[in-house]
Image (cartoon, rainbow, N blue to C red):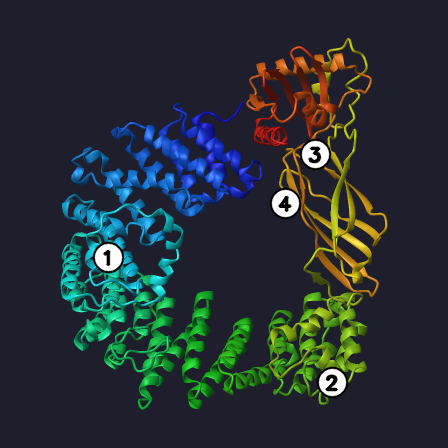
Amino acid sequence: MAVSSNYEWTQKIATFYASPSEFLANTTADNFMQDLLRILTDEKMSESIKVQILGILQEFPILFITSVSAERAVESVFNIYLQLPLAPKLVNLKCHLLLSVTAIVIATDHLVSHEKILKNLVKQLLDLVCGTNDHKNGMCFRPLRAVACNCLREFEMCYPGLLSGKLELLSTLLRKEVTPLHQAYTLLFSQVLKNAIHSVSQAHSASEGAIREMLERNEEIKWKVLEEQRDLGTAIATHNFSLLPSADETKELKSCVSLLLEESFLLTPVAQAVLFRDLSQVVLMVHSLSPVIFRSQILRLFGTVDISLLHTMLYMKATFTDSLFTNEDENLLLKRLVVVAQHPLICVPLKLFYLDCLLHFPENCPINSNLEENLPVLFTSKMANCLFPTLFNDSSIMLARLNLLSLVCLENAVDERGVSEIFDYLMSLYKLVDINGNRERIVTFFQAVYIFVSHFYAHELYMTELTIHLVQLYKKHCSLAPHMVNLLSSTQNLLEDSKWPLSLAGALQKLIVELPLEQLNPPNLMWHLKVLARMAKEGTLSQKATVQFLLSVIRGSDLCRMGDWRMGNAVLAVCRNLLHCQNQEPIFRDLADLLQHIHLWFQDIDIQGHAHFYYALLTCLSVEKLAGIVAVGSGNCSRTKANSLSLMSESVNSSFSILPLKHPVLQLIPAEIEDSPVSPTEKISNNLEADYLEKYLDQFNDPGFASTITLKFHLCFAENVDPHYHKIFTILLHFDLQNSHYEPLSDLHVPCLLFNQVPHILSLVFKPQLPFPFTMHTTAMFTTEEGDTYCNQLEPVNISFSQLFLPLPVPLSWPSEVKSSLFNKLWASLIQTESSQSVLSRFCFKTAQRPLCELISLHFQKYVVSRHLIPESYKVFLFLPPCINILFKLEQMDDIVKVDIVTDNWKLLPFINSYLEDITSEK
């Protein structure tokens, strides 16, 4: 039976939310939406289920892929809203219905041209908003008015200027409203006012009384220009338009803005922030309005602890600068940020925000105009001392403070004491890592080192001392090799002209190559090799000591005899990077000996092969040719160039790369389906006296029964293929069904394919768990005559529902009377069973396009088990793997055909319905 109970729909909704894509793979979006809309009209369903369904409509408007489906959904949901009585117990449901309609209209953008739908919706929203102070319906319907305000505001935000003709009405409603909904009315009015001012400012030929006319306007909404209004929202943010109205108009507009500001303290902090931003843009567009109008609010906001209000105040400061904020205000705001940035009761994310505000503080008179981190002019050393990091700070707070203090020290270059204190703090972190270096401490220390180096790389004394400490730290803890490599690469990318990264690299190299063999146990040696591999990329660093070190390790230890692949690969990584070195003369002999020794004695064939390959490159090619092959640029070559050698040496026997092709070269064309892929088991005999229904059903429990679908395809060339690919060989086809209801297909090999010759025929055997339609994605890998190997994505192949139909798994000798009797017994059995999988359904269609007999002949000829002429009726028996039966009774009734459907798996109903719709709508 189909899903109909509250519990089953709860489970179905939970399944959808768990994985929407997987859920929709088992049905179609259109059928799913029809089910949702049907449940909304079902009086037996609880309100909670309907609210959850409406939540799906609000969160996933992408389900409406066409304007027809979106229009049908909007009409259905809106009609449900209108038909529901205005009862207190239905307020919550009506609110969600309004939200759903608004979300579908705005998100899908398919209904902009449907004036009737939009006109009725906005009229209903305005009617609700006009019922101020709960006089019309009472306090219990206040949530409905709040939702209406929010929906109208959402419309105005998405289509700026939509409600500009209702400014007088909205202003009147705002003055009347004295309930807590005054906030919603205020935000709606401010949004409409801002967009209306922008529309007037855009009109270069605006008359003198344009603003007064705008404020007094109360006219119908102009739906014809709705499509053009969506682009205005971006224009408001990216263009500055200014108006210079008359004194009277300025006075009226100022009165309106002042009223909103005077009542702003009644709003929540977030609502106040939104209001101030809207009004800031209004003042910015109207040149005759002075920013001083915000002065009283700014004084009130200096003591705020709300993050949204503080952010809005900074926004207003960046917008109006010294027109609104004095130097004393700026100093006070800076002190306020310093205080809250170190307050113990404020959480870490907010402290980071306040520190970031200090680094991007909008000054009245900034020294430079770049958007990078800069300290304000009024930020003093005394303020900075309060923010000096401690070991008890959170790591992110500590790093942010360290960065801030470093900028302060750079500003005060004369005072060396600040740099000394920061370096001492860095050394305290060093001691923590040295004594007990957990992961967080290690990461924090190296990040702090990076910050210090990025600011003070020119202080040679401190940088030399830092190098000594880092080398000592690595000597004690060589597991820090990845952090050392990362620090070296990061500082080198940041400071291209600095010598410090190279100095650190040389010091680490010297430390490693001078280590005695006794201290080189396998774990430590792995870390050392990782560091040496990075140092080998430095073209200006002498690599002779590195090669001699590796040669002594290989010859003086049992490394080759052990044959550890990871260790051998680490050694070869150093050698591979050494091949990038332009000056190979000092290391040529030793590197050749090293590679040859590995090739001859290392007990791993993969390592031997790679060593032999590198040896061949080194000894058989000149430096110039080798440089061209490995794409060496300068000493610090790009990542793409550096990887070219790795691509070459991916395999000894296949040193080529697989080239991707953008356009398909091959295609799969479906051919005919195998006629009888399913054979009955021995449980079904030709004895017609037996209980053949029981025998028919029992065969599905037989382990030997394997129901599959065999589909044939022609593998041929796609259209307009380049002649370069007219002869291809050793074709490997990889199939991806992207459907969990089918077992994966094995790869297929095709020896060759020649242009203008007979296509190759493929027989693919699909074994479904549930016979749902699916899309097959195919990737082909092939070789051309020139020996190049290519990888190509073929056009996806859609397998339709009808391609999954199979003949009945019964003996061919059974007459149609026996099949008809089996049909009748199975029909009765499925209807009477209490299984939750069985379902009875009905589908009706008109026969105006073609007669029923022609429809049967075209689509069901092989599956008909019984037919009658008067009245014209047919019984159709479909079998789908693995063991699913679909039974149709088609009967002509005047110009209507009634199709009764019975199946033992209700999950197929959406696909059955879609299939019948398709074949009955064909012309």
Q: Residue at x 29, y 57 (%)?
A: 195
Q: Earlier in the sequence, mark 3 or mark 2?
A: 2
Q: Secondary structure at mark 1?
A: helix
Mark 4 to mark 1 CA distance (whole Å): 49 Å
Q: Earlier in the sequence, mark 3 or mark 1?
A: 1
User: In the rendered image, which quarter is residue 780 located in?
Assistant: bottom right
The kind of residue on which mark 3 rests is Gln
Q: Secondary structure at mark 2?
A: helix
Assign the C terminus to one quadrant of the image: top right
Mark 4 to mark 3 CA distance (whole Å): 18 Å
Pointer 1: what residue? Answer: 275
Task: Identify which residue, 244 or 547, lies in the foreground.
Answer: 244
Q: Position of residue 345 (x, y in %)?
A: 25, 61
Q: Does residue 617 appear left or right of residue 101 in this picture? A: right
Tag 3 near tag 1, CB within 8 Å: no
Mark 2 to mark 1 CA distance (whole Å): 68 Å
Pointer 4: what residue? Answer: 738
Assign the N terminus to one quadrant of the image: top right
**Total number of numbered discs in the rendering:** 4
Pointer 3: what residue? Answer: 803
Q: Which mark is residue 457?
A: none
Mark 3 to mark 2 CA distance (whole Å): 61 Å
The kind of residue on which mark 2 rests is Glu
Q: Does residue 822 appear left or right of residue 322 in this picture? A: right
Crowding at dot 2, Cα within 10 Å, few <14 / some 14-19 / many 20+, comes out as few
User: In the rendered image, which quarter is residue 265 located in?
Assistant: bottom left
Q: Earlier in the sequence, mark 4 or mark 3?
A: 4
**Location of residue 906 with respect to 541 vertically, above or below:** above
Q: Secondary structure at mark 4?
A: loop
Q: Which mark is residue 624?
A: 2
Mark 2 to mark 4 CA distance (whole Å): 48 Å
